[in-house]
Amino acid sequence: MPARDDALPLYVKEQGAMLGKSGDELTVKKSGQVLQRLKLIDVSQVSLFGNVTITAQALRVVATAGIPIGHFSYGGWFCGLTTGLIHKNVELRAVNLGDDADTTGAVCGQLAGAYWGESGIPKEWGEGLARRGMIERALEGLLASA
């Protein structure tokens, strides 16, 4: 499943090629020659076929962005998947499992917040939050006593 619907997959099939990072772009190179450049924001998923390598820098930036990397044999057989630890929709996915959905969503949100912190919570979620001021004051009180 692609990370985003408004971006396109990147398929790297050129044997001996290397997927790297340069600024905000992903680059596909072979023998030092650039074969392709793509802005990271335009990539929904990466599929590497056969003898294709990925640099540590490219792996870090792709995983951090929540873009899945599929690893395939030269013949196209699926070998594995690399994904980052992203926060995207984790609460929604937990709630959609059903059963005690409100409690599951609350616990999942608390764990995600503890792991990723405030910066991991989409800003639009806080904008429509009922009694936001009361919640923020209670949080400040908890942090002051910690």
Image (tube, grey):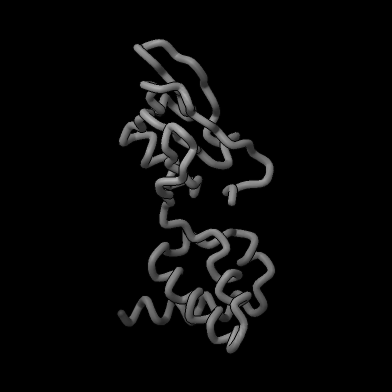
Q: Is residue 57 left or right of residue 138?
A: left
Residue 52 or 126: which is nearer the viewer? 52
**In terms of depth relative to the viewer, which is nearer, 87 or 97?**
97
- Residue at 41 percent across and 49 percent down: it is 80
Residue 100: x percent and y percent? 58, 89
At 64% from the left and 38% from the top, the residue drawn is: 7
Coordinates of residue 67 in the picture (x, y in percent): 50, 45
Q: Is residue 6 left or right of residue 28?
A: right
Q: Residue at x 43, y 26 (%)?
A: 23
Q: Position of residue 22 (x, y in %)?
A: 42, 24
Q: Quadrant of residue 28?
A: top left
Question: Among all residues in the image, which is located at the extreme front?
Answer: 75
Q: Looking at the image, which is closer to me, 84 or 128?
A: 84
Query: Along the horizontal axis of the image, is 60 left or right of 88?
Result: left
Residue 111's spot in the image, x, y percent? 42, 74
Task: Identify the residue at image location x=46%, y=76%.
Answer: 110
